[in-house]
Amino acid sequence: MDILERFSIYFCELDSEGRFLSGEPGFWRSLGIEAPEQPVLVAELLDEFVGREEDIRMIAQSGSGEISIPGIRRDTGFLDFRVLPAPGRSLTGAGGAVLVVMDSSEAMRAQQAILQQRNEISLLKRDLDRRNDELKALMKAVREQNHELSTTVRLKTKDLRQSRLSIIVKLARVAEFRDKETGGHIYRIGRSCVLVGRNYGFSTEDCEDLFYASLLHDVGKVGIPDAILLKPGSLSAEERAVMQTHTTIGSDILEGEEGKLMRTALEVARFHHERWDGRGYPEARAGDSIPLVARICSIVDVFDALLSRRPYKEPWTADAALELVRRESGRAFDPGIVEAFAEAAPDIIKLRLGSFDAEGVEDLPELY
Ligand SMILES: [Fe+2]
Ligand SMILES: [Fe+2]
């Protein structure tokens, strides 16, 4: 430690009695006392000097130019205390004085302890900074890992959905193989449902679900005997009853599958032959109690069937088929959906003619 650091120097005023009139605040602080309001002898302030007031006064008035007061203040740790005349001033009579307060070894030790503490604090701070950096690095790693994990989950989920979609498409093809309806009927139903759903306000995600779900609307036909399913003529009442079970067979096949897509598929398969007026099958549900997706598929399915050639009928014109759909509004069909269907009809007809290229529907994968 520099020797100068061991001294503190203060300027004070003395009166003619050699008493301190005033002192810099630091001086009083170094003695560990509050600045007194009245002139005071230093000896009165310091226990060690009690009884030596006269000596001090004499020294102060002797004009020797120096007062030296040995002793140790335990609370401040200062060893020595000297009063020197300020430059050009005398200690006798009123005059300025310079006080030099010297450090004791105790004070030095205290200072050293402070320095050591400062050192320790800076070491601690450095350690803290290092730990902080480590923590930041760790958090960054966790964030990266989280990101990686969520990417993996996203990919796996996508993968799962892809395999579900692919199973749906395969199942739809199986159903279509057995059905007498050919020429991409199922695919047209899917895309037409999307057109209607979009007009009705479905989100892209809901449209996609509707597309895949509607591919399976007749999946239950795999359970209908060929003699009935492929019979060229019209069906007897018993045969029709068996034929109608394709709705419940379909929902049985799709039963127990989790997720919105598969629930939608089940709803379409089970309820696409229900009627708005409650005269449909298998449950004779009416109005809003028929799932919305099934109400959409119902119109689309009938319209496509009307436009198709059958052994027992010629294909209807688009205008005649649309006319029938409008006529059935509020009877077989939900009026709200008939409206959305009529709006989409031009595109649906173009789709049938194979010249359709609407934006949005093209986002769905080509299946055939
Ligand atoms: Fe059907
Ligand atoms: Fe169909």
Image (cartoon, rainbow, N blue to C red):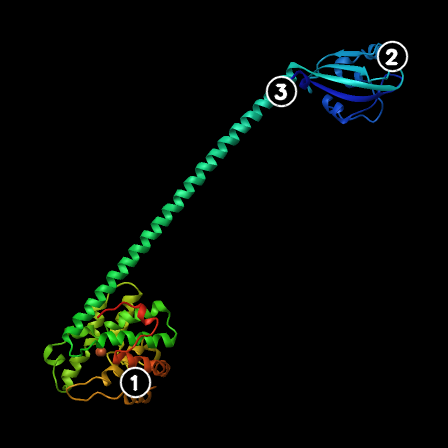
Mark 1: give few (<14), some (14-19) or many (20+) Cα within 10 Å. Answer: many
- Establish whether ligand 2 lies closer than 8 Å to the Cβ of label 3: no
State how far apart marks 3 and 2 are (Cα): 35 Å
At label 2, the amino acid type is: Gln
Residue 198: give its label: none
At x 12%, y 84%, the residue is 232
Q: Distance between the residues labelled 1 and 2?
A: 126 Å
Please name the residue that numbered disc 2 is placed on: 61
At x 14%, y 76%, the residue is: 224
| Number of numbered labels in the structure image | 3
Q: Residue at x 15, y 73 (%)?
A: 177
Which of marks 2 and 1 precedes in the sequence?
2
Q: Which of 208 and 42 is in front in this view?
A: 208
Q: What element carries label 3?
A: helix
* Residue 39 is at least partly visible in this image: yes
Residue reaching furthest to the left: 227
User: Disc 1, disc 2: CB below 8 Å?
Assistant: no
Determine which quarter of the picture holds residue 176.
bottom left
Q: Can residue 280 be seen in this view?
A: no
In the image, residue 98 sits, relative to residue 174, either above or below, namely above
In the depicted structure, whether residue 199 falls above or below residue 146? below
Secondary structure category for the residue under label 2? helix
Residue 350, position as x, y percentages in the image: 29, 80
At horizontal 29% and vertical 74% (from top left) the residue drawn is: 191
Relative depth, front residue between 330 and 216: 216
Relative to 274, 124 lies left or right: right
Q: Pointer 3: what residue?
A: 110
- How packed mark 3 is, by other alpha carbons closer than 10 Å (few <14, some 14-19, many 20 or more), is few
Instruction: Give the mark nearest the N terminus, 1 or 3.
Output: 3
Q: Mark 1 points at which residue?
A: 332
Q: Position of residue 244 (x, y in %)?
A: 19, 79
* Type of the residue with mark 3: Ala
